[in-house]
Amino acid sequence: MILSIARRELRALFHSPLVWVLAGVLQLLGAWLFLVQLEEYLQVQSRLATLENPPGVTDLVLTPLLEALAGLALLVVPLLTMRTLSEEFRDGTIDLLLSSPLRMGQIVLGKYLALLSLLSLLCLLLALMPLSLLLGGEIDTGRLASGLLGLLLLLGCCAGIGIYLSSLTRQPAVAAISTYGALLFLWIVNLAGGEGGGPLFDWLSLSSHYRRLLDGLVFSSDIAYYLLVTGVSLTLAGRRLESRRLQG
């Protein structure tokens, strides 16, 4: 049943003009950022050759590109998740789901898998740009793989948070704004600890875990953080639906 819900949601996503517009804008902005970073690298390449251990294309092109794409993700994901449950509440179609024999966790997980499939496709399309550099040079494929893994985990985590916040309101716009606020807070919360940050603030920050993955440092603690936040968000969304079902 989870896969059936996911397929239904995925079809709805691909039939939405908003999804195609967001995907197109994301690809255009990603391509523009990639070309800008590449042009800047080519301009300083001759000077880098005189250095003993010069930074390569991975440091000067791929890492800034993936970091910028993460910032774009914070803008795009709330627009994709805002209708997930809030529109069901607003249109009254949620009553059909609540009256079905499905468990609330299955409904939430099905919707999440549809979003994750879409976001994975977007990640794959974005990955084609840095991979194109293999045609004319060498890149650190290990760091690229680590960065793409971090981007996918970040997108999945943001989607989970967005689904939960969408379950709290009937208004998609309110869900989107709330998700923007929550993601921005989690992105910059490490700044609250001062210049060096703090253990708690650093652990809570989405950006701290993501930047370690961009550096090619794949720690199980960073992966566990994203999976934990995603799991908690989806669990809370399921409980919200269960509470709505009990209330009739």
Image (cartoon, grey):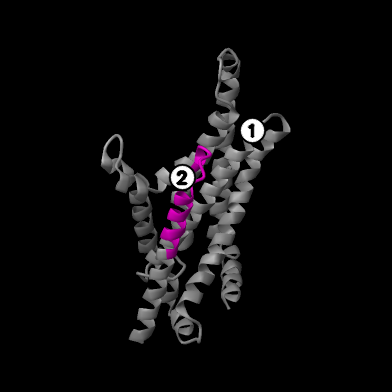
Tell me the kind of residue under disc 1: Ile
Q: CA distance from mark 1 to mark 2?
A: 20 Å
The residue shown at (73%, 33%) is: 135
The disc, 1 or 2, on the residue closer to the chain's N-terminal end is 1
Q: Which mark is residue 139?
A: 1
Magenta segment boundaries in residue numbering: 213-231
* Secondary-structure class at tag 1: loop
Of all residues, the one furthest to the right in this rendering is 135
Residue at 61% in and 55% down: 121
Helix, strand or loop at label 2? It is helix
- Asked if residue 117 shows in the view, the reply is yes
Question: Could you tell me if residue 36 is visible in this image?
Answer: no
Q: Residue at x 37, y 74 (%)?
A: 240
| CA neighbours of label 2 inside 10 A, class few (<14), some (14 to 19), many (20+) | many
> What is the magenta segment's predominant secondary structure?
helix
Q: Is residue 183 above or below residue 34?
A: below
**Magenta-colored stretch includes residue 218:** yes
Give coordinates of residue 216: x percent, y percent: 53, 39
**Residue on which disc 2 sits:** 210
- Residue drawn at 52 percent across, 40 percent down: 66
What quarter of the picture does the N terminus occupy?
bottom right
Number of marks drawn: 2
Left or right: where does residue 68 sit relative to residue 125? left
Q: Position of residue 211 (x, y in %)?
A: 45, 41
Residue 93 vs residue 217, the one in the foreground: 217
List x then y, in percent, for residue 143.
57, 38
Amino acid type, label 2:
Tyr
Q: Quadrant of the C terminus?
A: bottom left
Q: Nearer the viewer, residue 174 or 70?
A: 70
Does 45 sit above or below residue 103? above
The circle on residue 47 is none
Rendered position, 220 above or below 35? below
